[in-house]
């Protein structure tokens, strides 16, 4: 492919044109509760170009050629995407598939996944596409969504004022939330590369590759819903990450309630990972240790509230839940006489809540249970505390 631009000093780029790796495929996204197919026109290999660095306020740009000549795979979608939201969904779906088959880690901040967009608008009901504008310098899926929304608005204003949209390449300015002119759009010229021998992909090689493809996200999601009885939302969250879904599947081998496992992973684990910036592959504890902690809740060894503290300690140190509970003295108080003594003191200390409860305000009981939990630093068995209070209050 021949073109002249500073990111390609030799002025031609080795690419596939007539015979791409794949063509006429599709990726399904889910929007407004409906499945929608986004066509994939081609998937082909080409060599990477350099990277232009535009420094704010500078009269010149820098060229980084570290990645120039490195092979990449380009996936070209059909013009089936109708909004920034659909583009965001498409990219997330594609990213998950690529991570499942371990083609790429898809880290946009490191350049292992990049994206350009072509945007055009047309009158409602028209079958002919408008003039397309290419947008580059998109550093995140959020930037893709915002750039599409901005371009739609910019092009609409041009046409409504009687102007013409020019075919050009524009650059997304993240700080200002706008696109700016980069260069005019020039159609590339193609010519055969005489030093490249053809690659023959025979049926046996193709079948060997097909046999190595793992269970893909949509298939795993459907299986988790059927096999483990997970709601669609839970299955979607768990299977969005191959590593998380593998961890989940190991957990359900050791624990009897798949829904409890998914709740803990979605709420407790993912919140800690978001807070720390760590990944599931960095976990210091095993699925079996995690399930041992869940079993300790079932047996009444620890309360659900204490379990959250134990879980965080497991995450930070990698210690087993049994060792943490023992070291910190976190065993749940289930001795009836001890809890009754604490409950009587709480009743004496909170006459207003006792009166509210006897006058039919059921929330007052929750407050009194909370006071018992406070007195025991969260170690009281909440079910027993509730039962004892009801008995004492009559």
Image: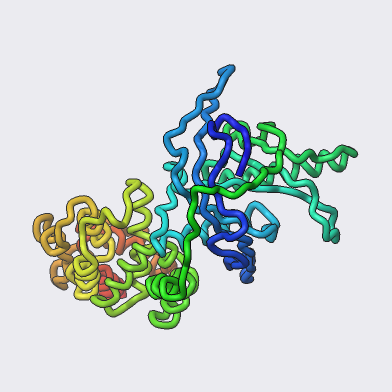
333 and 309: which one is in front?
Answer: 309
The image shows residue 296 at horizontal and vertical percentages of: 19, 70
* Residue lying at the far bottom of the rendered structure: 227
Query: Is 258 placed above or below 40 here?
Result: below
- Looking at the image, residue 337 sits to the left or right of residue 25; the answer is left
Q: Quadrant of residue 135?
A: top right
What's the colour scheme?
Answer: rainbow
Q: Is residue 230 visible?
A: no
13 and 364: which one is in front?
Answer: 13
* Residue lying at the far right of the rendered structure: 162
**Residue positioned 27% across, 65% down in the render:** 304
- Looking at the image, residue 348 sits to the left or right of residue 24; the answer is left
**Residue positioned 34% across, 72% down in the render:** 260
341 and 201: which one is in front?
Answer: 201
386 and 206: which one is in front?
Answer: 206
Query: Is 40 placed above or below 115 here?
Result: below
Quarter of the image containing the C terminus? bottom left
The image shows residue 114 at horizontal and vertical percentages of: 52, 46
């Amino acid at each position: 492919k021949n073109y002249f631009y500073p990111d390609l000093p030799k002025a031609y780029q080795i690419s596939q044109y007539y015979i791409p790796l794949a063509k006429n495929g599709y990726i399904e996204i889910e929007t407004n509760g409906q499945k929608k197919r986004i066509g994939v026109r081609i998937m082909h290999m080409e060599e990477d170009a350099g990277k232009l660095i535009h420094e704010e306020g500078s009269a010149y740009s820098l060229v980084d050629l570290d990645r120039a000549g490195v092979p990449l795979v380009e996936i070209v979608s059909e013009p089936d995407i109708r909004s920034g939201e659909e583009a965001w969904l498409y990219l997330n779906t594609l990213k998950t598939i690529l991570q499942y088959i371990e083609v790429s880690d898809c880290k946009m901040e490191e350049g292992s996944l990049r994206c350009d967009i072509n945007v055009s608008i047309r009158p409602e009901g028209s079958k002919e596409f408008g003039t397309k504008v290419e947008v580059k310098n998109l550093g995140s899926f959020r930037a893709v969504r915002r750039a599409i929304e901005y371009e739609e608005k910019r092009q609409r204003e041009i046409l409504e004022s009687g102007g013409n949209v020019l075919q050009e390449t524009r650059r997304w300015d993240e700080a200002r939330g706008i696109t700016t002119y980069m260069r005019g759009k020039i159609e590339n010229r193609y010519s055969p590369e005489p030093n490249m021998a053809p690659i023959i992909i025979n049926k046996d090689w193709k079948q060997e590759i097909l046999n190595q493809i793992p269970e893909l996200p949509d298939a795993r999601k459907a299986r988790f819903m059927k096999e483990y009885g997970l709601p669609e939302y839970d299955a979607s969250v768990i299977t969005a990450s191959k590593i998380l879904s593998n961890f989940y599947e190991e957990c359900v081998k050791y624990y009897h309630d798949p829904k409890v496992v998914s709740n803990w992973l979605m709420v407790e684990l993912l919140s800690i990972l978001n807070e720390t910036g760590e990944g599931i592959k960095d976990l210091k504890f095993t699925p079996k240790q995690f399930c041992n902690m869940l079993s300790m809740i079932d047996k009444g060894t620890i309360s659900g509230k204490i379990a959250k503290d134990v879980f965080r300690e497991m995450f930070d140190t990698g210690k087993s839940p049994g060792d943490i509970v023992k070291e910190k003295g976190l065993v749940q108080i289930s001795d009836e006489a001890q809890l009754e003594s604490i409950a009587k003191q709480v009743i004496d200390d909170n006459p207003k809540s006792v009166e509210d409860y006897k006058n039919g305000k059921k929330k007052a009981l929750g407050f009194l249970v909370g006071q018992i939990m406070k007195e025991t630093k969260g170690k009281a068995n909440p079910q027993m505390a509730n039962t004892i209070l009801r008995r004492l209050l009559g």
